[in-house]
Amino acid sequence: MVTSREVAGIEIFALLSTEQQERLARSAADVVLVPGEFAASEGDDRALFAVLEGRIEAVKAVDGGERVVGERLPGDVFGEVPIVLGASFPVGFRAAERSRVLRLTPTEYHLIAAEEPVVAKAVGALAQLRMTGERGLQGLAAVASPPRATVVGHRWDPDCTRLRQFLHGNRISFSWVQPGAAGSEEWEGALPPDAELPAMRFADGAIVARPQLRRVAELLGLDTAPGLAEYDTVVIGAGPAGLAAAVYGASEGLRTLVVERAAPGGQAGTSSRIENYLGFPSGVSGDELASRALQQARRLGAEILVTRTITHLDTATREVHLDGGDVLRARTIILACGVSWRRLAVDGFERLAGKGVYYGAARSEGPNVHGFDIHIVGAGNSAGQAALFFSEHARKVTILYRGATLTKSMSQYLVDQIANRPNIAVVFGAEVVAAHGHESLEAIDVSDAQGRTARFESGGLFIFIGADAETQWLPPEIALDRRGYVLTGPDVSVAAAWPLERDPYLLETSIPGIFACGDVRSGPVKRVAAAVGEGSMAIAFVHQYLADVEKTAATAARVDAP
């Protein structure tokens, strides 16, 4: 409970009368924080805080990590910038040691400020101080953090493309040097020979030629090795469903591990703009959504491993075998491994894959299409979002679609935006039948509804024609539908043998204690929000399953007792 004496010890509230201080003490929340706990996270809604005990650090998310940019001690306030500007928190505030803070809602603050304008004036002056000056927000914004790595490699080298996409997906800042192009001085010395490309220089000066992604992750300090031998739940895949499971599992006290083969975010992480995700009235990029979820999961205690794949699941012992020989024990397993873009058997596609022909698209590819005419195959939301994003960089974007209208497969808001972009064209009844080029894509052959073929120059071909389940690695005990998606819940009872008397839970596979959520599950709703919902539901079923196991064990112990 906050006391009026504690309120009086805060400089800006010392100006209030005793009666006003007592009223503020009654309305303020008394928040106790353990070390590492956030009073307000970056992006949270506005509120005004004051430190009563301990020490609070101001932290800013930078390059997938956190940077301490200031501190608050007893008597100090924080949140003055959001409360004055009506904005969200530009930085987070975390307890560096056990601390107490008082919290005022905007309504409570404005009642005090209206009654005693001198408080509003003091808070406004403090907000201005925080925003200006070398150590203020303007100073932080003016000082660009140096990139954590420099990549040198050719534009049309698939290995260089994979490396850049990996860095971008893991929120690692980097600069890219192309041999023979402007800006090669960033490498600071002679460029490596082509046989050693792509190459990377890290912030500490280390240089690695043709690096493996796991080596890159290790040198950048990303987690690649599990910290425990056993977990309450192991989540396979870090798309929206997997990250949601990580957030809910860790927040509810489960020892939670997420295993991701590349970078968190899944296919949704490459979406340029999701306009219909609840709670984001101005839309949100898939990259931003994934970044927020990743920070949240880590803050709550989940372990996130990257560049690791599962080589074997032992459904009897719940052992998870990772590439490299690590073996984990999991009380439960959540399959959230998603899908991969379906590949087309078209002449020239395989030879030019990664050299101008791409399956899906990463936001990091935007600058590479600057000034080019590019083509997109597909008519779903992913294709529409990619077209809108690339239209901000390319000279012209052409959507090629075999059907007659976009409205059957694309959200109306995307159809409307595409219609209003002057440099986006849509060609119906069209099919790409060949790709041409020597070192990279140069042109494509397109067939129309009448069977006539024409050739068009192309600076990039991005394909979004559906996806296939990533389940070929699963053991045969886990039942799949005819297309390779994981059966769950009632579908398991119909199609496979179920070993228990109870029915399988809604997201439970044919093996009790192994669950599936998101796009890998048979019959999912193809929406990001649905995947997030399924990830959280999977954790609820994990709790039910673990409770069943404990109840069964207790019953067996009573039966065996003398």
Image (cartoon, grey):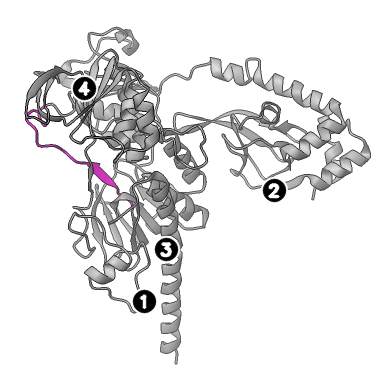
Q: Residue furthest right?
A: 18
Identified by mark 4, the residue type is Gly
Q: CA distance from mark 2 to mark 4?
A: 54 Å
For residue 542, the mark is 3
Q: Nearer the viewer, residue 341 or 191?
A: 341
Q: What span is colored magenta in the figure?
A: 336-351
For residue 123, the mark is none
Q: CA distance from mark 3 to mark 1?
A: 15 Å
Determine crowd level at label 3: few under 14, some 14-19, many 20+ residues with C-alpha closer than 10 A: many
Identified by mark 2, the residue type is Val
For residue 460, the mark is 4
Q: CA distance from mark 1 to mark 2?
A: 43 Å
**Image position of 473 (left or right of 81):** left
Q: Which residue is mark 1?
A: 502
Which x, y percent locates residue 403?
20, 36
Number of marks present in the image shown: 4
Q: Earlier in the sequence, mark 3 or mark 1?
A: 1
| Label 1 SS | loop
* Dot 3 and dot 4 residues touching (CB under 8 Å): no
Q: Nearer the viewer, residue 298 or 455?
A: 455
